[in-house]
Structure formats: C-alpha cells, structure tokens
C-alpha cells in the first residue's frame, strides 16, 4: 500500500510517499481502507516533536527516541471496512466508519488496522468522509472543553484560539447551549467564525482581549498563550477557565486558583469515548453542527498540507483525500 512515511523528526520534507507492506487484522481488529484523514496542529507538533516538557520523555519512549516509529503520522480518519478479524462481530466489509488512530497514529496511508472498539459507524449519505474524519480530534476535544466549562443559557463565553479544528467545534457546541460567544483569532478566520455563530470576534494581532475590560462567565483558552493572571481577573464571580493547552506552571496555578478563590480552572484531557463520537456524528448528520473544511490535499501532498498548517493560517480543518469522492 501507499503511505506517507516520516524518516526523522523535523520539517515537512522529512515525509515522503512510499510503498509499504499492507497490514493484516488480528482476531479483534478491523482493516479499514482510508478515504479521508486530516492534518491538525497537533500532527505538526508531533512531526517536529514540539511537545510540552511534562510529556516529552514518555512520548519519545513510546514513539521512538531517534526517529518516529512506525513513521506514519495522522490522528484521525474515515473510510470503509475492507476486512475483519475472526472475532469481530460489529462490522462487515463495506461499512463506513471513522475514529481515532490513538497512539498508533497511521492515518496517512491507504489502509489501517485498529481494534473494533475504536471504530464508529456513520451514514455517508448524511455526512461526508471528510466531515467524519474531523470528529475524533477536533470534535472530541471541542465537545470536551465545552462540557468542562459547564455553560448555561445566556452565559458570556470567550474562546481564545477559536479558528482551528477544536475551536470551530467548541464555538458551535457552546452556541447550542445558548451562550453569548466572543471568539479570539486573526485575519480571515474572523469572517468564518461569525458565519459559524460567533456574536463578536477579536483580532489578537490588533487588540489584547485581556485588557479590554470585559468580564466573562467562561473563558476557553485553546491557544494557551495569554496571561493567566489577567484571564482570571476577567472572570465574573464563580467563573470557569478551561485550559485547552496548559503548561506545567499553568496546571499548578489552576489547582491553586480553584482552591483559594470562587473561580474554577480545568485542564483535564479529553476521553475519546464512543458515546462522544456518536453524539457528534448525530449532530453533523442532522445538520446541527457543520465541520468547516479549509483546504483539501491528496495523500502525496501531505508534506504540502503540513507546510500550510505550520503557517498558522488554517481555518477549521485541513483534510487529506485518500480516495477521491467519485470513487467513494
């Protein structure tokens, strides 16, 4: 099969298209022919190994000390079941499925083998393969952050770093709960955010939102680059601050703030549950949530897609088309 293989940690040109051995499913595994995958900011951080210090050593031991193994990146995918292991009961050849690749990664390829409990079925007549591929990372994390925020109808919410895959989902989930939402990002992302339901947008290149005197019930900080102390001061009484990209220092400060003040700070990692994937799937299939897709690339263009995401200009999701639509 064809796959994009990364020879070493570093820039996008460390990746190239190769012919490698096609995997075969074990007893409880499913072989999926991938139709679509994505490139997230997290994928680029893994490629560069730009990882927070707290996770640097354990992830390097898991992924490879001197070079990534097996060297095929990609955290999320959608495709069709090609064949199943002897003990698989829930899927059959031809089923449309999506899911996370977990720490195995491997979505930049024509096929992938995964345990069946990581797969979620969907109806390709109601949701495209591209849309389904955006759920396991952007969708799950966006939903998780909004759940942690415990948003109520009428709450005044600010989402910092709203223009990416996680933020565009978080915005729409918060809107479903009846929140008044301000989104912080830059440039052409602002028009997209207004179209997705933002009540107000702030260009961080022109205005420091932490100094505008506004007060919020909830701040969801996906970017993780703003002043912690000023963000805390922006919260109303019993306000909630959700750290989507916390530093080690930020985690310690979060515990202290939650202990000694009436404000709560959260930083827990998302759980990639089947129930969450099904919920998001249903919202997309009914048209309640719309994944925003910025650019599309082919499998051989994955290095180019990574270069684009590295610019920081990505709006919503960037997808990789492994099987063209007319062949789906």
Image (cartoon, grey):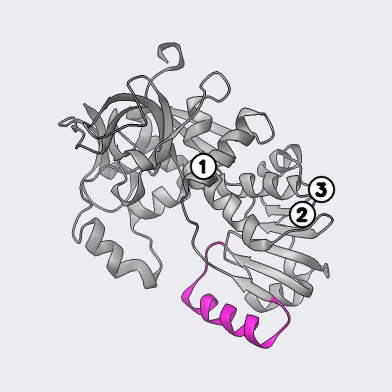
Stretch in magenta? 244-263
Identify the residue position indicated by label 1 in the image: 277
Provide residue 265's location: percent of width, then percent of height.
63, 73
What is the distance, in whole Å, between disc 2 and disc 3 at their CAs? 6 Å
Mark toward the start of the polypeptide (2 vs 1): 2
Apparent side of residue 179 relative to residue 105 in the rendered image (left or right): right
Q: Label 3: few (<14), some or many (≥20) within 10 Å?
A: some
Which residue corresponds to mark 3?
199
Give the labeled residue for mark 2: 182
At horizontal 62% and vertical 65% (from top left) the residue drawn is 242
Q: Quadrant of the N terminus?
A: top left
From the viewer's side, name the closer residue of 205 and 240.
Answer: 240
Going from the N terminus, do you reach mark 1 or mark 3 first? 3
Q: Nearer the viewer, mark 1 or mark 3?
A: 1
Image x and y of residue 271, in percent:
47, 56
> Is residue 79 among what the camera can see?
yes
* Residue 204 in sight from this viewpoint: no
Please name the residue shown 67% across and 79% down the image. Answer: 229
Q: Identify the element where label 2 is drawn.
A: strand
Count numbered badges in the picture: 3
Residue 89 in picture, x, y percent from top left: 32, 31
Residue at the far top: name it.
Answer: 326
């Amino acid at each position: 099969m064809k796959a994009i293989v990364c020879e070493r940690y570093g820039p996008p040109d460390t990746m190239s298209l190769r012919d490698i051995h096609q995997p075969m499913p074990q007893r409880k595994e499913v072989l999926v022919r991938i139709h679509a995958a994505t490139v997230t900011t997290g994928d680029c951080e893994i490629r560069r190994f730009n990882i927070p210090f707290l996770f640097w050593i354990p992830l390097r031991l898991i992924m490879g000390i001197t070079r990534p193994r097996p060297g095929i990146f990609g955290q999320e995918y959608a495709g069709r079941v090609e064949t199943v292991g002897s003990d698989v009961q829930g899927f059959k050849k031809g089923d449309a499925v999506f899911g996370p690749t977990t720490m195995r990664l491997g979505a930049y390829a024509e096929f992938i083998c995964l345990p069946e409990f990581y797969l979620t079925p969907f109806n390709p007549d109601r949701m495209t393969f591209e849309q389904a591929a955006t759920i396991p990372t952007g969708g799950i994390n966006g939903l998780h952050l909004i759940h942690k925020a415990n948003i109520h109808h009428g709450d005044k919410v600010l989402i910092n770093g709203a223009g990416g895959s996680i933020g565009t989902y978080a915005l729409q989930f918060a809107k479903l709960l009846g929140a008044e939402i301000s989104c912080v990002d830059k440039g052409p992302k602002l028009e997209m955010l207004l179209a997705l339901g933002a009540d107000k947008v702030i260009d961080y290149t022109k205005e420091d939102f932490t100094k505008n005197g506004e007060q919020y019930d909830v701040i969801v900080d996906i970017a993780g680059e703003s002043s912690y102390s000023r963000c805390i001061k922006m919260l109303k009484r019993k306000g909630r601050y959700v750290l989507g990209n916390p530093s080690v220092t930020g985690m310690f400060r979060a515990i202290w703030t939650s202990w000694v003040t009436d404000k709560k700070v959260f930083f827990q990692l998302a759980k990639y549950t089947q129930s969450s994937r099904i919920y998001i799937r249903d919202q997309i299939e009914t048209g309640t949530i719309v994944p925003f897709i910025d650019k599309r690339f082919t499998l051989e263009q994955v290095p180019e897609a990574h270069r684009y995401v590295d610019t920081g200009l990505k709006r919503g999701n960037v997808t990789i088309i492994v099987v063209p639509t007319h062949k789906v």
